[in-house]
Image (spheres, coloured by chain):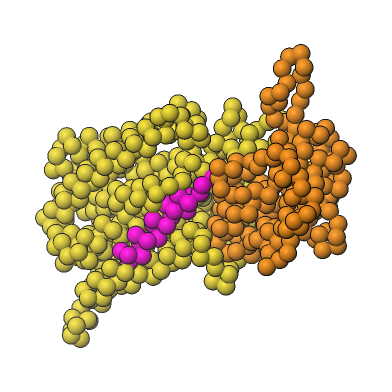
Amino acid sequence: MSNKKYAIILDDTLCIDCKACTVACKCENHVPAGFYEYRNWVGEVENKKAVFPNISRKFRPSQCQQCDNPPCVHVCPTRASYQTEDGVVLVDYHKCILCKYCMTACPYDARYENTDIHAIDKCTFCYHRLAEGREPACVETCPPKVRKFVDLMDADGEGNKILQTTQTEVQKPEKGTNPKLFYIK
Amino acid sequence: MSSTEAAKSHSDMFNGNKNIPMPLIGLLIAISLMGLYGVFNIMTKGHAASLGTTKTVPWGLLISTYVFFVVSSTGLCLISSMGHVFKIEKYEVIGKRAIVLAILTILCGFGVIATEIGHPIRMAIYNVISPNLFSAIWWMGTLYGIYLMCIIAEFYFLMTHNHKGGYYAGLAGFIAGISAHSNLGAVFGFLEARPFWHGPYLPIYFILSALISGCALVIIIFNVAYKGEANMPAKAKEALLGIAKIFGLLLGIIIFFDIWKVLTSVYGAPPEKYQTVMAMISGPLSVNFWFFEILLGMLIPFCIILATKGRSIKAALVASCSAVVGIFFMRYDLVVAGQLFPMREATAGSRVQGVVEGLAVYTPSASEITIVAGAIVLCAGLYLAAERFLNLTED
Ligand code: SF4
Ligand code: SF4
Ligand code: SF4
């Protein structure tokens, strides 16, 4: 068992829709230029608190939820999609047969077909950077610091402190995927 | 088997049906070459540029046609097992024809899916060296592989009049076929993400619809083999009339299934299921649903069988042709509809691909259509060739 469990906590009220995270991710991870080839996105969401004349807009940056119970891993016939000991869901590109079962299984539309490597790709939590002690590119680049990259195994760490003291939500909790992307309410 | 019997069986094995015109076989196989257009596109331009599938609708016409082919194959195998596995004597005559078509349909199905899978060779390797026993696709593929071996053996035994071998291979094929086919239902049924598919309904429904396809195809191929009812031997007629009745009963059951599937998806507007079913009832899939799936696939054949009380082979043939066309669209609707409700809301910036008014759009590409049409015509051509060159008549 690993002594780490990575997660990201987002305060999307801070998001200014600059999309720096999407650019950083594309550059860092050699994601092809295609409009529909991407690992993360910033979608506008309905802002229920905004009532005329107090209008404002709300954006929700997102990516693969790094589900603790990942359906994409369960369905993959060749174990190309797998979960590391520290809870990160990755794709072994050499084993991916492009059956696209994981794409139909993911409740978050977080996967895409990478036309450069001819395999399914998705957010890796920038796994290659973690070994060097660096944060994921999207976390590092964000001007208003929407994302916090945390380790849930660190009992006294910042992540657990926020989760214990602040109300957070995950997306589609009813799917039972136990996402590790938490949004501050 | 004595040596004279063995010699006899080998000599009559290739005593085919000379009524099948060679030019027709040649023509069908020539037409099927159109599929190469799609295959060529995929090989030169890649899947992403050749297929109509999107990030939102990753499975399209090629997957639904694969399902159509394997549904047909399983159905033929299950129906034919009534004769040489469950020993209902009257159905023994259908054995060879049904099994040869079961082999050809599953091979064409495999061919179609090989064009859809991005790395078919990698699949063959990693399915073996890195299997995921929790994956329904892994089980489906593996069980269909075993199933194909069983029905090939079964066919060989039937052709060489080895009844014992035919029985055991047939039984194995029956079990492998049921397991593989319900697993195919589970490929969809396991997906919690897709409420329209999720649950035990699809594995059960797949078996039922396979039986319907099997009945319809048996009725069609016997009419082709004997050029209609007039030249049919009494035994074949008797078997077909029995099958026509079973066909009618199964159609009644599937109508019942469909009614409850629709009602439970509409009642109280359960999220995602409701939008999906409404896409079929009054949305982008409504022509497919009402005209092909409901009218051609269920109501017309059911009414024909009901009106003729299953006593007319000619009427059963019309019902069967209508049902097979309808079933093709049923598969398409099932596969595509399940993906129409996007997994994320397509708001500004979300980059959800191809969503119009809350529903994903999928249109098959020319490459997909040519591959599918080519495979269907090829299957028909190969069946006629088998009929012409092999002795498929049970004595
Ligand atoms: S969000 Fe999708 S791709 Fe990411 S782990 Fe969950 S199911 Fe897999
Ligand atoms: S597309 Fe690749 S990663 Fe996805 S389920 Fe198939 S083999 Fe696994
Ligand atoms: S963690 Fe890395 S891979 Fe994932 S969205 Fe951020 S930059 Fe992209």
Q: Residue at x 65, y 33 (%)?
A: B346
Which quarter of the rendering shows the N terminus of chain A?
A: bottom right
Left or right: residue B29 versus residue A75 is left
On screen, B249 above or below B46?
above
Residue B254 inside the magenta-drawn segment: no
Residue B187 inside the magenta-drawn segment: yes
On screen, B242 above or below B162?
above
Q: Nearer the viewer, residue B71 or B227?
A: B71
Q: Estimate the x, y position of residue B126 in percent, counting from the top left.
A: 58, 68
Q: Nearer the viewer, residue B208 or B372?
A: B208
Q: Is residue B343 visible?
A: yes
The colour of chain B is yellow
Left or right: residue B62 versus residue B52 is left
Q: Residue at x 68, y 24 (%)?
A: A48
Q: Nearer the viewer, residue A81 or B323?
A: A81
Residue lying at the far top of the rendered structure: A53
Q: Residue at x 47, y 36 (%)?
A: B273
Q: Residue at x 88, y 39 (%)?
A: A143
Q: Which residues are magenta?
A: B173-193
Q: Estimate the x, y position of residue A53 in percent, counting from the top left.
A: 76, 13
Q: Which quadrant of the structure image shows residue B21?
A: bottom left
